[in-house]
Amino acid sequence: MAEVRDQPVIIKKYKKAAEGGHGGSWKVAYADFVTAMMAFFLLLWLLTMTSQQKKIALSNYFQNYSIFEKGGGAAVATKQDTPGQGMFDVGRAIQPAPPKTVLANELADRIKRQVDDQFKEYRDRVLIFTDDGNLRIEIIDTVGSSFFEVGGTNLSGSGKALIQGIVPALKGMDRKLIVEGHTDSLPYPGKGFTNWELSTQRALSARMELEKNGIPPNQISMVAGYADTKPFIKGNPADPKNRRISIVVDYKSSMKTAVPPEKTMQKPALPDSPPNLVQ
């Protein structure tokens, strides 16, 4: 027993290892990952709730934003020079509309739904966008297909049906309408009848069809033919898509504002209908 008491007392200390291989810093990284995923799914949800037109406008806003430009611009889609290549830009907002009027983006959605429901085959030939505060509805031709009779100025059956389908969205608006006719740069192959007469008479045919389907005559403030001076495809003036009818909803006007008699447009006398030639 004496020998046991004389033995030295040995005390062993065990140092507890740190939690995990990196001491718990993984928790911070994991929290950052979860936060990033939450933000990502929130972004996906917002994208699904945003219309295509607003997505394009927002995309261009962030791509073209400059700290050296004046603030206060709105991310509103507007038409640029080259369709299909940066068709939308930022900086020009739609003019404020008085109460009880249809806003431009709401009207565009209504017309788009109408075309999608009734004229799916023409979805790519009815383009809707804002331009300098107004809403433009472009009804365009394509290679071998026109909304007018071959070489003539009268609307074809499909052209009449399409305008008839758009009219319900335009009825009852407190805004004036402008009807424009456009052609490509190919000269009209007839004597005494040029692209100026062709574009003007086609615009008049579209006006008559609008009024026939319920648009009041006093709602149409102007009918104009521009021939090939305002091509839709600026890089190719001869492109068939330049042959089109434009219906412009003028958001700077109001049906309540009387037009002075001296400013009322006088519809010019036009020559006889052209020969049945292909345009």
Image: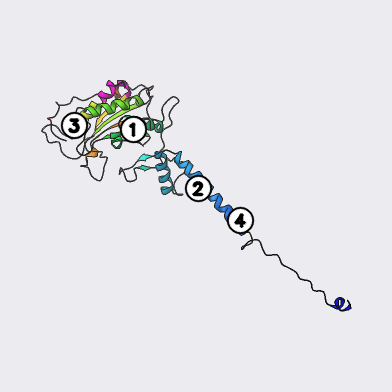
Crowding at label 4, few (<14), some or many (≥20) Cα neighbours within 10 Å? few
Viewport quadrant of the C terminus: top left
Residue 179 in view: yes
| Kind of residue indicated by mark 1 | Asp
Question: Between 259 and 95, which is closer to the camera in this rendering?
Answer: 95
In this rendering, which labeled residue sits more in front, label 4 or label 3? 4
Question: SS at mark 3?
Answer: helix
Question: Between 143 and 99, which is closer to the camera in this rendering?
Answer: 143
Name the residue that disc number 4 marks: 27
Label of residue 198 in the image: 3
Crowding at label 1, few (<14), some or many (≥20) Cα neighbours within 10 Å? few
Tell me where the magenta segment starts and ends, as one range: 207-219
In this rendering, which labeled residue sits more in front, label 3 or label 1? 1
Label of residue 116 in the image: 1
Mark 4 touches mark 3? (CB < 8 Å): no
Q: Position of residue 59 (x, y in %)?
A: 42, 45
Mark 3 touches mark 2? (CB < 8 Å): no
Residue 76 in view: no
Question: SS at mark 4?
Answer: helix
Q: Position of residue 62 (x, y in %)?
A: 44, 47
Question: SS at mark 2?
Answer: helix
Question: How far apart are the alpha carbons under marks 4 and 2?
Answer: 20 Å
